[in-house]
Amino acid sequence: MSPKPYLHLIKSQAEFKKNFVDEEAPLFAELKNEPASKWGRKELFACRVLPKQGDHNLPCLESFKFTERFTTDQMKAFIDGPKDPADLGGSELALVKKYGHSLGQLWAALAAFTGPPERRKPFSPPDEGSGGGDNGNNDDDGNNNGGGGDGARWPKRARHSTQQQGFVDSSTLKFESNSPIPSSQGSQGSLGYVDAESHALAAGPEDDTLRLITCALRHVLYFAPPNNEPNAAAVVEVRDAKIRLDNNIGIRSLVAVDDGGLCLREPQIFEHRRSDGSLCQRTVYTTANNHVLMLETKRMLQCLPQGVPIISDACLAQMTCQALSCRIDNSGRDSVIILHAAQNYVCFVQFDMSTDYLLGLSPEKWKDLFRKYTV
């Protein structure tokens, strides 16, 4: 029998202490050096992750809540969705012509998961031994584990209704925590029912999820205030490039690769010499923060107890490693935000890690820290 998911099991410090002992969990100093893609349940206990119920908004965004409704036509169209569900069976060109460049590309990306099944080409992994160095996987070592080894070929079967009594058609996860234990705080939403078989049928390459999320983020950044001002003093933009995070706590390495994210750019004035030798000034938007938000995408949900989606232990542990390594790189802030997406299911996760908590992770201090929080 599979163990209860960590996010269902641990909801208080008392539950954490009990299960830490029951599962004979290791201390952080006792962990092996593994990349984020190899982290799992024991690393969650070792890092003392304590999930808690979250609010509708991430705590770090409370002071930025808008009191006014979105007023731009593009944002209204984004919230309303496609005018006709049948449009998701059309080509990307047709969608762009009808909805505009930004929304057209977004609805085309969404159609990979919610459009007619006939529109979606079954995802077939490359045959073993077919040559080529790329195995089609995507993990934190630069390989790609979203690829195909887990039954990615679609079975030929009739689709059926996924509506279940007592569930709504949406899916987000909510959780948060307290310092100094590393916190994961998530956006709130109604927990919906997901049919595992139908969900697996829609599974394609991980890049399909990534494209949908980046299209949605770009649309919001282009048209939602206040970021939609072309000459703003600072702008948030999508970062497509994946960044490798490689840090250490004591002798333990923290190696992770994100799937892109959001970055902050600010204008700076630089002197430029023209071809005639004269000097002039020009404004260049340079990167001030590469990790406003990190992305972690999967080709499908990995944990569906009773049809209710929840972040799996392995995925939560992977994001924990990413958050720890990012927090070390960004000493000026205690929170790290990761957007986790699988197909068209999205969850914002906030990890809170104080400086005292990070200092306590050093091997020589772990036993004292353990006693402090278990007395």
Image (cartoon, rainbow, N blue to C red):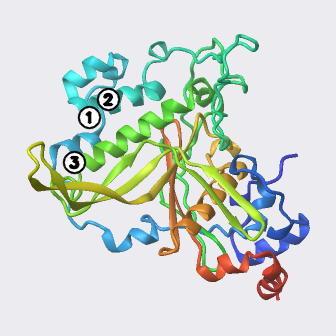
Asked which secondary structure carries label 2, the reply is helix
Q: Residue at x 57, y 42 (%)?
A: 193
Q: CA distance from mark 3 to mark 1?
A: 10 Å
Q: CA distance from mark 2 to mark 1?
A: 6 Å
Lateral position of residue 252 relative to residue 230, left or right: right
Picture residue at 31% right of the left edge, 56% below the top = 286
Q: Earlier in the sequence, mark 3 or mark 1?
A: 1
* Mark 2 and mark 1 residues within 8 Å of each other at the beta carbon: yes
Q: For mark 2, does the 10 Å Cα neighbourhood hold few (<14), some (14 to 19), or many (20 or more) residues? A: many
Q: Which residue is mark 3?
A: 223
Q: Amino acid at mark 2?
A: Gln
Kindly identify the residue that appears in the image at 67 percent across and 22 percent down: 133
- Name the spot of residue 77 as percent of width and height, x first: 23, 40
Q: Which residue is mark 1?
A: 102
> Which residue is disc 2 drawn over?
105
2 or 3: tag closer to the N-terminus: 2
